[in-house]
């Protein structure tokens, strides 16, 4: 039995590994040993990690194929991941160019790649998702400019490359939802523009270290801040009370518009119920309450794995 050999540190390591794999198992995404280490919820030495991996493998709680670990004895999941990594590699340069373009819009202070692409994965119908930080009290002006531009991308069938799903302004940089989903999404953001603001954002969300203490946000890929003439002109033009009133107007108008969509039960092209969670300083798309579903699935899966591990003790 495990308790006959394993001490408290090894048991803690085993549970941490199972929790890391359980989260990514929801997305059918096996992890390499290095990735597993970064997504642990506690600090471990490499020898502690490897010993725990060996023990979990020996008890068939985890499986290894081609250098990747998963919870199922199914090598097909590895092929899916590798194919997704290749697609992500091809999409990344385009995502970087688009993020740099979005940064040129008025009141946009920082842009980062988010979603599955920030985790180096893209399926056959992948969107390119972006996380955007705007100037204080100008989120709705910035968002409106960006979404008016996105309307033009429908003409070329490129709208999937411009999924601006999450906006915050500089007044709302600490993320309110503190759970495994939010922590993973925050730390895996891939900054492209606005490095100073992104750095402030990460510093204001140090709570993620309670969930993922070994993961270090990637700042080295971000470009330095740049100024653009048209952007600067429009920002000066709307820096007055007129800009304040316009931002309030666009906030209330957009919120009412989305509430009507929700009341009508409209769904997006992926079949998910349309849902936009809004506030004066944030805007986030959450079709079908996706975050809550992921957290519930994760907690259920962790409970199951914890019980299986306990049965071996």
Image (cartoon, rainbow, N blue to C red):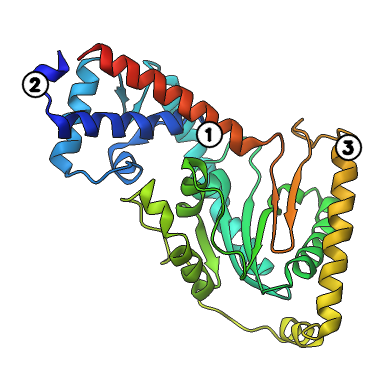
**Which residue corresponds to the image point at 46% horizontal and 69% vertical from the top-left?**
199
Q: Quadrant of residue 130?
A: bottom right
- Characterize the local packing of mark 2: few (<14), some (14-19) or many (20 or more) Cα atoms within 10 angstroms: few
User: Which sits earlier in the primary sequence, circle 1 or circle 3?
Assistant: 3
Q: Which residue is mark 2?
A: 5
Residue 175 is left or right of residue 255, and the answer is left
Q: CA distance from mark 2 to mark 1?
A: 33 Å
Instruction: Name the mark on residue 146.
Output: none
**Which residue corresponds to the image point at 28% horizontal and 38% vertical from the top-left?**
33
Q: Which residue is mark 1?
A: 295
- Residues at marks 2 and 1 touching, judged by CB atoms closer than 8 Å: no
Secondary structure state at the residue bearing disc 1: helix
**Which residue corresponds to the image point at 76% horizontal and 42% vertical from the top-left?**
275
- Characterize the local packing of mark 1: few (<14), some (14-19) or many (20 or more) Cα atoms within 10 angstroms: some
- Residues at marks 2 and 3 touching, judged by CB atoms closer than 8 Å: no
User: Which sits earlier in the primary sequence, circle 2 or circle 1?
Assistant: 2
**Whether residue 67 is visible:** no
Indicate the position of residue 41 as horizontal and vertical percent values. Answer: 33, 42
Q: Quadrant of the N terminus?
A: top left
User: Which sits earlier in the primary sequence, circle 2 or circle 3?
Assistant: 2
């Amino acid at each position: 039995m495990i308790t006959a050999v394993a001490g408290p540190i090894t048991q803690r390591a085993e549970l941490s590994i199972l929790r890391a794999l359980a989260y990514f198992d929801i997305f059918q995404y096996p992890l390499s040993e290095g990735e597993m280490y970064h997504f642990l919820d506690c600090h471990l030495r490499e020898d502690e990690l490897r010993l725990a991996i060996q023990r979990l493998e020996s008890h068939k709680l985890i499986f290894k194929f081609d250098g990747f670990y998963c919870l199922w004895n199914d090598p097909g999941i590895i092929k899916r991941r590798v194919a997704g990594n290749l697609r992500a590699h091809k999409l990344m340069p385009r995502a970087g160019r688009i993020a740099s373009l979005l940064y040129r819009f008025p009141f946009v202070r920082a842009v980062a790649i988010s979603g599955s692409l920030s985790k180096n994965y893209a399926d056959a119908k992948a969107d390119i998702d972006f996380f955007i930080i705007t100037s204080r009290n100008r989120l709705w002006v910035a968002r409106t400019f960006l979404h008016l531009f996105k309307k033009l991308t429908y003409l070329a069938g490129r709208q999937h490359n411009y999924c601006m799903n999450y906006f915050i302004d500089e007044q709302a940089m600490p993320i309110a939802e503190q759970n495994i989903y939010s922590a993973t999404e925050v730390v895996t953001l891939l900054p492209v523009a606005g490095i100073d603001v992104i750095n402030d954002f990460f510093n204001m969300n140090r709570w993620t270290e309670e969930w993922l203490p070994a993961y270090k946000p990637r700042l080295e890929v971000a470009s330095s801040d740049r100024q653009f003439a048209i952007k600067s002109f429009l920002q000066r033009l709307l820096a007055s009370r007129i800009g304040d009133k316009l931002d309030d107007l666009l906030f209330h108008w957009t919120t009412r518009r989305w509430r009507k969509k929700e009341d009508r039960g409209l769904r997006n092209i992926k079949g998910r119920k349309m849902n936009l969670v809004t506030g004066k300083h944030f805007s986030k798309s959450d079709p079908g309450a996706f975050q809550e579903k992921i957290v519930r699935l994760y907690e259920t899966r962790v409970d199951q794995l914890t019980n299986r591990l306990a049965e071996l003790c």
